[in-house]
Image (cartoon, grey):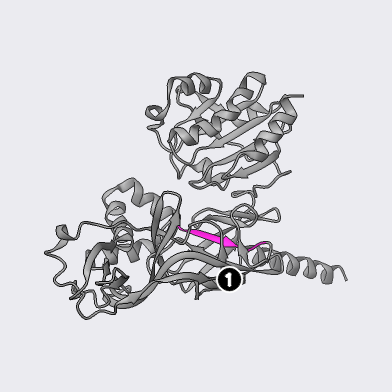
């Protein structure tokens, strides 16, 4: 009987270990962007007209009998591929990319570099007829000749998910681009949208792809919708693209209520940390794996704050465990602009009341962005000169966004807030302004 129970124990241990280390393959398929509801402009790329006379040597012919109002060129895909040359020209970046994404991704990029550059820029133009009606033309064949391309009318409103109506001027077309398929440069026809949204200051213009990769992830025995955001669909992923999970299962992807984070970061769900362990460069699948909780601990309210030691801007070192017995605020800056810093400045006054503040800057050149008043205020806090891929950001699962994490006197996480500061400010006021 003892041998039987011993065998059961061993089998249970092996099952537990395999379940902890097993990878989940999430198959992705393109869905229309109008079939989902997502918060913010994370699907949009800014569009700005260029002076078409500057490009007259590149663009051979325009449509006859139509007046050209503006010429646009969508270069985001071209710029994504240009990231490759940056990676391979910087040894530190190459080593970091290898560590983040592995040998297979680096091998893909090395192959890509041998074929780059190739033409993946999309040209388009806005024209008017004699009556003043506006039309839009995509260079469908990518031959820099608009004479044989469809002349498209703008939709004045678009019905999206849940019956909502988007007040915008939108045109939907297709264009051929060149891309690297892993072995050679091939041509693919993609769906693309040009959109003009009215604002108080005129029109905002955007590019969007007409579809986005979507799948279903299983966490803790439950299934949740998942999308990949702000990437070039069916092409090369890169580390600052986003994954969003509809944790509330309400058919909406909301930044504050759902999970929304950059692909390279681990994430926490129900006190367990996970990571995307593999990315398919063409957007057909991702692999998700439960992390070793000792190496990549979960980040959630009520859990212990992971310890770290970092150098500060005054050449000293700060150890998180030395601050136990104090409230500690970790402030992660999303940029070096005076606006971002001033928002964090709302909390710096609590440093005089006993709050220990550690600020993680967006880059090492933050000093030139500070005015005299802010420089005087932040002397009450510790400044860590860092970048967006700093190990502490990854440890606390913070990407390039604004984030604040409050740690209580017992060394446990009390508040986590990203994008805004409302919860943190209320908690600090409750603690220090009694």
Which residues are the magenta region? Answer: 241-247
Q: Quadrant of residue 66?
A: bottom left
Furthest-right residue in view?
Answer: 1
Disc 1: which residue: 161
Residue 410 position (above or below residue 10): above
Q: In the rendered view, would you say 386 is above or below 191?
A: above
Q: Which percent across, then down, holds residue 151?
A: 29, 77
Left or right: residue 379 versus residue 201 is: right
The answer, for residue 308, to whether it is visible in the render is: yes
The residue shown at (41%, 31%) is 366
Q: Position of residue 272 (x, y in %)?
A: 67, 55
Residue nearer the viewer, 133 or 389: 133
Left or right of 78, for residue 362 = right
Q: Nearer the viewer, residue 285 or 59?
A: 59
Residue shown at 56% from the left, 35% from the top:
331
Where is residue 78? Give x, y as percent: 29, 62
């Amino acid at each position: 009987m003892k041998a039987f129970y011993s065998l059961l124990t061993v089998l249970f241990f092996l099952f537990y270990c395999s379940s902890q280390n097993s990878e989940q393959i999430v198959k992705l398929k393109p869905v229309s962007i109008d079939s989902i509801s997502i918060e913010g402009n994370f699907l949009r790329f800014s569009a700005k007209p260029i002076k078409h006379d500057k490009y007259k040597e590149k663009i051979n012919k325009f449509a006859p009998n139509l007046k050209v109002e503006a010429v646009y060129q969508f270069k985001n895909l071209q710029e994504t591929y240009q990231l490759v040359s940056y990676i391979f020209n910087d040894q530190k970046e190459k080593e970091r990319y290898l560590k983040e994404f592995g040998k297979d991704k680096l091998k893909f990029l090395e192959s890509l570099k041998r074929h780059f550059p190739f033409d993946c820029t999309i040209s388009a133009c806005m024209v008017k007829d004699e009556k003043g009606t506006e039309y839009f033309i995509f260079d469908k064949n990518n031959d820099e000749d608009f004479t044989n391309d469809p002349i498209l009318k703008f939709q004045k409103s678009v019905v999206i998910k849940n019956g909502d109506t988007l007040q915008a001027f939108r045109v939907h077309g297709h264009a051929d681009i060149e891309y690297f398929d892993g072995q050679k440069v091939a041509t693919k026809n993609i769906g693309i949208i040009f959109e003009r949204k009215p604002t108080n200051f005129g029109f905002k213009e955007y590019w969007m792809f007409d579809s986005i990769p979507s799948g279903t992830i299983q966490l803790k025995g439950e299934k949740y919708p998942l999308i990949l955001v702000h990437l070039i669909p069916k092409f090369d992923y890169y580390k600052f693209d986003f994954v969003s999970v509809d944790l509330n299962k309400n058919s909406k992807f909301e930044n504050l209520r759902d999970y929304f984070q950059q692909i390279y970061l681990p994430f926490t769900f129900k006190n367990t940390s996970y990571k995307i362990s593999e990315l398919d460069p063409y957007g057909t699948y991702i692999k998700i794996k439960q992390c070793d909780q000792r190496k990549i601990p979960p980040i959630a309210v009520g859990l212990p704050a992971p310890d770290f030691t970092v150098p500060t801007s005054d050449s000293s070192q700060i150890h998180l465990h030395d601050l136990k017995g104090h409230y500690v605020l970790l402030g992660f800056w999303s940029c070096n602009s005076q606006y971002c810093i001033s928002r964090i400045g709302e909390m710096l006054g609590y440093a005089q009341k006993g709050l220990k503040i550690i600020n993680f800057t967006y880059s090492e050149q933050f000093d030139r962005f500070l005015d005299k008043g802010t420089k005087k205020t932040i002397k009450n806090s510790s400044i860590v000169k860092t970048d967006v891929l700093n190990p502490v950001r990854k440890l606390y699962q913070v990407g390039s966004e604004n984030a604040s994490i409050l740690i209580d006197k017992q060394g446990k996480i009390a508040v986590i807030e990203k994008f805004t500061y409302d919860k943190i400010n209320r908690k600090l006021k409750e603690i220090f302004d009694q």
